[in-house]
Image (cartoon, helix red, strand yellow):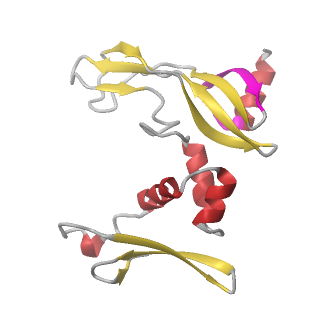
Amino acid sequence: MARGQDNGITILLGVKDLKIGEATEYEEKIVVKASLKKRAEICPYCGSTKLYKHGKGRTRQVLHTWSRGKRVYLELNLCRWKCKSCKRTFSEGKDLIRPHSRITKVTEIEALWQLKDRSFAQVGRDLGISYSTLRGLLERLIDENMLGSILNEDEIHLGIDEHSFRHQDLVHTVTEVKQRKMIG
């Protein structure tokens, strides 16, 4: 593939650190093979540069974006690394995807952006993301400053709800259920 085409595809997909390979279109999805351009250089835990390859992760498909009404998946094969200093292992690509996640951070941002105006059910149906995943994204977004009054509690019971006024102006609320306090 010519250099200009490769650059254009990475711009369209919004992934500058990936080397894009073959793209295959199916009836319901598009799968793009991708790998990282550069390998891990420092340990995310201790900052050491003394790393060695510690195996290869299994190939997995993660939802990245949508095109022409079809889901676009990245087929990633990320390497595992081990630090010689702190003896901890980690996978590369933490800027692209969270550990054990099936969606990229680009997809997370899109889902949260759509939750501003639409219900969990609508966003989940349109994007193909489950309610529990959407809820987890929203819970991760809650700032610790909002939780300041309840951080010293042993247990926190969060409630997330959505309200609309005349089926417009959708508002999501976060509450502490036991204390009946509005958090955000």
Question: Quarter holding the N terminus?
Answer: top right
| Looking at the image, residue 10 lies above or below residue 113 | above
Relative placement, left or right, of 163 versus 182 is right
Residue 166's quadrant in the figure? bottom right
Q: Residue furthest bottom?
A: 166
Instruction: Confirm whether the magenta stretch covers residue 42.
Output: no
Which residue lies at the image location 60% right of the left edge and 44% below the top edge?
A: 106
Relative placement, left or right, of 183 versus 62 is left
In this rendered view, identify the residue nearer to me: 6 or 28.
Answer: 28
Which residue lies at the image location 77% right of the left edge and 18% below the top edge?
A: 3
Relative placement, left or right, of 28 versus 177 is right
Residue 91 % position (x, y): 40, 26
| Looking at the image, residue 126 lies above or below residue 71 | below
| Looking at the image, residue 76 lies above or below residue 158 | above
Residue 151 % position (x, y): 24, 68
Which residue lies at the image location 82% right of the left edge and 43% below the top edge?
A: 68
Instruction: Confirm whether the magenta stretch covers residue 20.
Output: yes
| Looking at the image, residue 15 lies above or below residue 83 | below
Question: Quarter holding the C terminus?
Answer: bottom left
Q: Residue furthest front?
A: 27
Whether residue 16 is visible here, answered yes or no, is no
Which residue lies at the image location 39% right of the left edge and 76% below the top edge?
A: 175
Tell me which segment is drawn in magenta: 13-26
Residue 48's quadrant in the figure? top left
Residue 155 % position (x, y): 22, 67
Q: How many marks?
A: 0
Whether residue 13 is visible here, answered yes or no, is yes
